[in-house]
Structure formats: C-alpha cells, structure tokens
C-alpha cells in the first residue's frame, strides 16, 4: 500500500528539491512588474510577468506566465530606483517554497532596470581599459586651487544642479566669477557636448577650476558620464576638474578620472569656492599675530637701544682713549727714550757678569755637578728596592678602600632606616590600610568617587573596592537620610 503524506511533509519535500537545485539558488529572471505593494514593514511583494517566452528552460506559454516575488526591507534599502507596475526589470535572487501556503516564489536580492545589465558590462569593460592606461592613478591628478576666482560649470542650464552650484558659490564668495557652458547631461550626443565644453574652457583658459556634473538618476540617466569621450576629456584637461555626478551612492567613470570627486553638486561648489568669511577670519588672526610680533620686535630693539645708551663708554667716550694716552705718556717719559744708551749699558753689564761667571771659567764643574747628582740617584733606595715605593702606595690604597666600604655601609644603613620610616608613614595613610579595618570605597563607571546618593540613580553600574578585591554591582534603590 503506498505511503500517505501530510501536506506539511509534501511541502517540505518539494522545498528540499528546490533548495538542492543549484540553478535556482542564484537565478536572474526578466519580466514586467505587476501587483507591486510596499508594506509598512518595508518589505515589497510583487509579481513578474512576461509573454510566455523562456529560452533558458525551453518552454513557451502564449498566454504569459507569472512569478510571485518578495524583496525584504534590508534589500529594498539598496535599490537605486522606485519600482512601480509596468517596469521591466531583471530580478536576481533564489527560488524557494513558502511552506505555509505551499507556493514557490522568488526571493529577490537585487532589482535592475531592464538594460542595466548590458550597461554594467560596458561600464566594467571601459573601466578596466582606462585603469590599464593609468587614467585613474592618483599621481596624475592635479591639486585644486586654494582661492579660485573663476569657476567653469559644465551642466544642464535647467537642472537643480546648476542652481545649487550658483547658490553655494555665491554664498561662500560673493565676488567669484561663474561661467556656465550649457550642455545635455543625458541622451544621445550628451557625452560629445560635455567633452566639447571641457575642451572649450581649456582652449580659452576661462576658469581656474571646472565643475562637471548633474543631479542624480538611474544608471541610464548618468550614462553620458560613463562614455569614453567624456572620460578622456576630463583626463586630458589642464584645468583641475571636480566631478559632481549624481548623489553620494552614484559613481561614474568621470568620478574616478577627475582630480576631485564630490558627492553632490553643492559639495563641489564648496570644494571650488573658498569661504571668504573664513579666509577673512584667518587673515584677521594672522594680522593680529603679525602686529604682536612687530610690537615684540620693536620692544626688544628699544630695550637694546636703551641698554646701549646707558653704556659708560657712550656716556663718557674719552675714557676709551684715556688708558692709551696714559701708556703713551709713560713711554715718552721712560728712560729708554730719554737716554737710549742706558738700554745697551744694562745688556753690557749682563754680558760681563756672564763672562766672569765660574761656569765659563771652569766648564767642567757643570759636568761634575751632574755626575754627583747621578751617583746619588744610582745609590738611592728607590732604585735598589723599587718595591718599597709600591708597598707604601698599596698600604694607603687599602686604608682608603676600607674607609670607603665603611662609609658605604653607613650610608646604606641610613637609607634603609629612612626607607622603613617612609614605608611606615605610607602604610598609615594608605587606603588599603583603611580597607583592612572594614571600610570600602565606591566609584562610578567614570572612576569618580561616590560620596553622595545624589551621584547615582537606578540602573547605574558602581565598583566597590574592599581589602581583597573589587565588587561590581548595579544600583537597585537609592535611600536618602
């Protein structure tokens, strides 16, 4: 007799079959959205329908087919567009069975507007090509001017982006010059117009910095800024370019190759136009610093001048010459100038005394005296017993060493006694000594000592230190006295 299954068992069985199918774990389904509903929870429920053609599975249904889909809130938050009935999309996700209702449905992780898949492939191919050429390298990017006086704007004249750029630029720098080159920012020919505008500004040198961009949109809307003519024009510009295409989450190839990328057109204006009020404040601060520095220099120079004025040489300059004049007078009055022959007389007297000296009359006495001294030195005990010299030095060294050891021991005993006294004093005032007597100290989570119930409230974490550790607790009740 064949086995009888419950509904739950059948649904689980079918679910297991679908879960085991590798193709259904990550599948892309193309179709038209219908019955789209977004609930307060943020989850979206809809159906995908088509004309019945399905080449992947080899089936054709002339009446068309419908596939139920669900997209949970955390996936919906990543969508770049607002789905609505009639949109042709590619849904990426997994096919699973909802056991309670016994129905299978597509759990969508990603929704792409139809055609976005081809565009993404073109985007990645061109991105890889340009990256290989080094157009995205940081080394080739130019710094933005610190105080641009002329800003070139390449965007649509009717969009919100140009209004935001003008408003922010005028607010930051009322005197700045803005030059708008109106272009198409989407559709056929838009890329060529943007490229011509960038070339025009470079040829005429009309701007210090360029803002190239538009407001946000779908990938198709932003595609002009992913096309090769636009990207190469941005890379070739000798004028620094700020790319301001789309919103914060939208990245185009122009963003990668531009000298600076702004998340929004307003942010691009903030990067391009210096804040004159802030510069004025900085200028005022620098002027004050310069004035204080000059005042200090003048004060220092004035002090040095006053010191020089009080110098006695400047107050009585003839004193510089007085000493020299005194020397000159002494020389003039010296006997050597009054009677030069007296110089020679003194020298002659010295010469005669040398000639009459015993050494010159009997030179051998010089050698006899030296021989006598040599004989005395030869017969001295220091040469006969040289070890006596070292014995005396060693005895003195031993005595000095003994004195040094005795002095070090005395100092050590004194230091140990002083340390013991200090340790005893510290122990008397140590909080741990207080803890040993049964007291404790409580601090809050900010490590501040709690001395009043006003410092804590219900639910606060407190830490109490006792003699052998800490107790962490949570305040349950506060009572006041």
Image: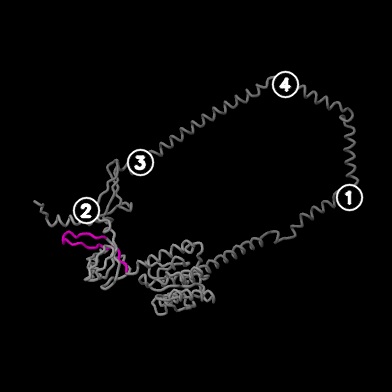
- How many C-alpha atoms fall within 10 Å of the one at disc 2: few (<14), some, or many (≥20)? few
* Residue holding disc 3: 428
Q: Nearer the viewer, mark 4 or mark 3?
A: 4
Pointers 4 and 1 in contact (CB under 8 A)? no
* Residue holding disc 2: 476
Residue 322: give x, y in percent of width and height. Answer: 76, 56
Depicted 333 relative to depicted 284: above or below: above
* Residue holding disc 1: 338
Pointers 3 and 2 in contact (CB under 8 A)? no
Distance in Å between CA atoms under marks 3 and 2: 35 Å
Find the magenta span and give its range. Answer: 94-113
- How many C-alpha atoms fall within 10 Å of the one at disc 1: few (<14), some, or many (≥20)? few
* Residue holding disc 4: 380
Taking the magenta stretch, the answer to whether it contains residue 379 is: no
Q: Nearer the viewer, mark 2 or mark 1?
A: 2
- How many C-alpha atoms fall within 10 Å of the one at disc 3: few (<14), some, or many (≥20)? few
Residue 222: give x, y in percent of width and height. Answer: 39, 71
Position of 458 with respect to 274 (left or right) is: left
């Amino acid at each position: 007799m064949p086995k009888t299954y419950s509904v739950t068992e059948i649904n689980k069985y079918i679910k297991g079959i679908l879960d085991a199918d590798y193709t259904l774990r990550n599948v892309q389904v193309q179709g038209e959205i219908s019955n789209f509903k977004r609930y307060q929870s943020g989850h979206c429920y809809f159906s995908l329908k088509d004309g019945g053609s399905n080449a992947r599975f080899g089936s054709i249904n002339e009446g068309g087919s419908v596939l139920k889909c669900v997209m949970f809130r955390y996936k919906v938050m990543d969508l770049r567009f607002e789905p609505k009935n009639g949109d042709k999309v590619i849904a990426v996700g997994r096919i699973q069975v909802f056991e309670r209702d016994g129905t299978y449905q597509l759990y969508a992780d990603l929704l792409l507007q139809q055609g976005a898949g081809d565009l993404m492939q073109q985007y990645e191919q061109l991105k890889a090509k340009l990256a290989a050429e080094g157009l995205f390298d940081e080394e080739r990017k130019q710094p933005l001017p610190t105080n641009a006086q002329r800003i070139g704007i390449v965007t649509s004249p009717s969009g919100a982006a140009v209004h935001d750029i003008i408003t922010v630029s005028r607010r930051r720098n009322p005197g700045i010059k803005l030059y708008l080159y109106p272009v198409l920012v989407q559709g056929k020919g838009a890329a060529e117009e943007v490229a011509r505008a960038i070339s025009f500004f470079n040829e005429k040198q009309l701007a210090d910095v360029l803002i190239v961009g538009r407001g946000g949109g779908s990938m198709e809307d932003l595609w002009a800024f992913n096309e090769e003519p636009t990207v190469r024009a941005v890379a070739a510009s000798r004028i620094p370019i700020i790319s301001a295409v789309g919103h914060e989450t939208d990245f185009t190839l122009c963003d990668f190759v531009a000298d600076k990328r702004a998340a929004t057109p307003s942010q691009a204006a903030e990067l391009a136009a210096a804040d004159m009020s802030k510069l004025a404040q900085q200028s005022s601060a620098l002027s004050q610093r310069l004035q204080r520095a000059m005042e200090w220099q003048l004060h220092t120079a004035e002090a040095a001048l006053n010191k020089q004025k009080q110098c006695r040489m400047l107050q009585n300059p003839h004193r510089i010459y007085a000493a020299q004049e005194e020397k000159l007078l002494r020389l003039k009055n010296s006997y050597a100038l009054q009677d030069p022959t007296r110089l020679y007389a003194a020298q002659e007297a010295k010469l005669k005394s040398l000639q009459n000296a015993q050494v010159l009359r009997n030179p051998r006495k010089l050698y006899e005296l030296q021989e006598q001294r040599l004989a005395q030195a030869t017969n001295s005990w220091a040469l006969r017993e040289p070890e006596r010299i070292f014995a005396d030095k060693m005895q003195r060294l031993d005595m000095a060493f003994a004195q040094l050891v005795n002095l070090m021991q005395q100092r050590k005993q004194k230091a140990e006694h002083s340390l013991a006294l200090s340790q005893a004093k510290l122990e008397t005032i140590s909080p741990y000594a207080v803890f040993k007597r049964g007291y404790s100290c409580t601090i809050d989570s900010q490590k501040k000592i709690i001395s009043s119930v006003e410092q804590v409230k219900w639910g606060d974490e407190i830490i109490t230190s006792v003699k052998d550790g800490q107790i962490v607790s949570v305040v349950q009740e506060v009572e006041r006295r």
